[in-house]
Amino acid sequence: MTSQPATTGTELPLLADLTTFRVGGPVGRFVEATSEEELVETVSSADRSGEPVLVLGGGSNVLVADEGFDGVVVRDARRGITVESQDACGGASVRVPAGQPWDDVVLRAVAQGWRGVEALSGIPGSSGATPVQNVGAYGQEVAEVISSVRTWDRATGRIRTMARAELGFGYRRSVLKDSFVDDGTGTAWSPSPRYVVLEVGFQFVLSESSAPVRYPELAAALGVAVGERAAAAEVREAVLGLRRGKGMVLEETDHDTWSAGSFFTNPVLSASRAALLPPEAPRFAAGERVKTSAAWLIARSGFTKGYGQPGPAALSTKHVLALTNRGGARAADLLALAREVRNGVWEQFEIELVPEPVLLGMRL
């Protein structure tokens, strides 16, 4: 573990250095944990002393206040992919530490013939973040292949391993996202997540073909019908191509990727509420409810690609669902743009958009 002392000096990273939005102020203390024991001890000792804690992975799903965080920021630096078992009958049982970059897991899965995450290619961030909000894209969700999640329970001070059935997965939700402790950081930062993800277990079917392709845009890119399969490697390349076209693959020089990806979740409506949408509005079955497209609502509310330029915060020039830092943006600039978009959609459709990234130190 490398730990930097509590100070406001320039030797400490800013949260802007640790997040893909590239905004956020100073930290009180920074720790990079290289083992599970060090990660748990850092969090538990801070909890015992009443020091605020922020655990970060890749920093790709957070928008952090300009004022920064007067506490300890812990980054999980652990890497590795462990295959516990693999055979044609039982599939592959795999364990991954929370700090492992997610797309490396997808790359390994495609190479090894582990089916079920190929459509989740190109998503930035750490593996430990994927079960928290049940990461999904192009018709797949990580919940479909997760077998268990090993956590540090801050409320009880114990290691707790939760099976898939205990995790309460839903659309961009899980028990991990919805459970909190009050760590005394004040109303803007509290409550704080109860569970710190330590390790994620996966159970994969072995196959060189993909899971059924459910997303029409991806199916069209592959030249297959919805519900058909394709080679997993081809699905990965198609997804990466689609994501690049929307500015959703991180590129140092491309400000469209200085973002947290999709900023708003797709609204899930009652059938009666969905019936009030214009006939051409996208509709997707979501159990007894109906999911519609946040991007469609944003575009039909008068917000175009690049909206907000030449300001420091603007919608992506490639996709209206991404808020981006055009260089020099502050968290306040991005928050103001998010409010403008949310309010515009409400005025047009009376549907409230919900942010997908975690807002730290601020409220929409």
Image (cartoon, rainbow, N blue to C red):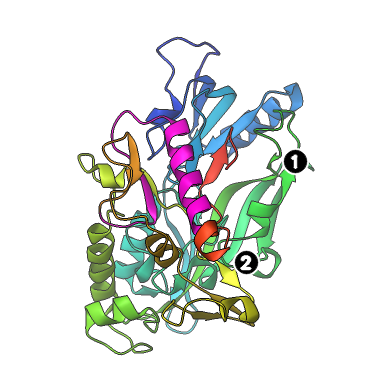
Left/right of residue 235 with respect to residue 289 in the rendered view: left
Say whether residue 27 is visible: yes
- Given residues 344 and 49, the one toward you in this image is 344
Could you tell me residue 151's position as x and y percent? 64, 49
Say whether residue 97 is visible: no
Could you tell me residue 24's position as x and y percent? 46, 29
* Residue placed under numbered mark 2 in the picture: 169
How far apart, in angstroms, are the residues tagged by discs 1 and 2?
A: 20 Å
- Given residues 347 and 162, the one toward you in this image is 347
Left/right of residue 306 with respect to residue 340 in the rendered view: left
Residue type, label 2: Phe
Q: Quadrant of residue 328?
A: top left
Residue 284 belongs to the span the image colors magenta:
no
Disc 2 on helix, strand or loop? loop
Could you tell me residue 78's position as x and y percent? 45, 41
* Residue placed under numbered mark 1 in the picture: 181
Q: Earlier in the sequence, mark 1 or mark 2?
A: 2
Q: As displayed, is residue 307 above or below residue 320?
A: above
Q: How many marks?
A: 2
Disc 1 on helix, strand or loop? strand
- Residue drawn where x is 55% and y is 45% of the image: 358
The local crowd at label 2, few if under 14, some if 14 to 19, many if 20 or more residues have their Cα within 10 Å, is many
Q: Residue furthest front?
A: 347
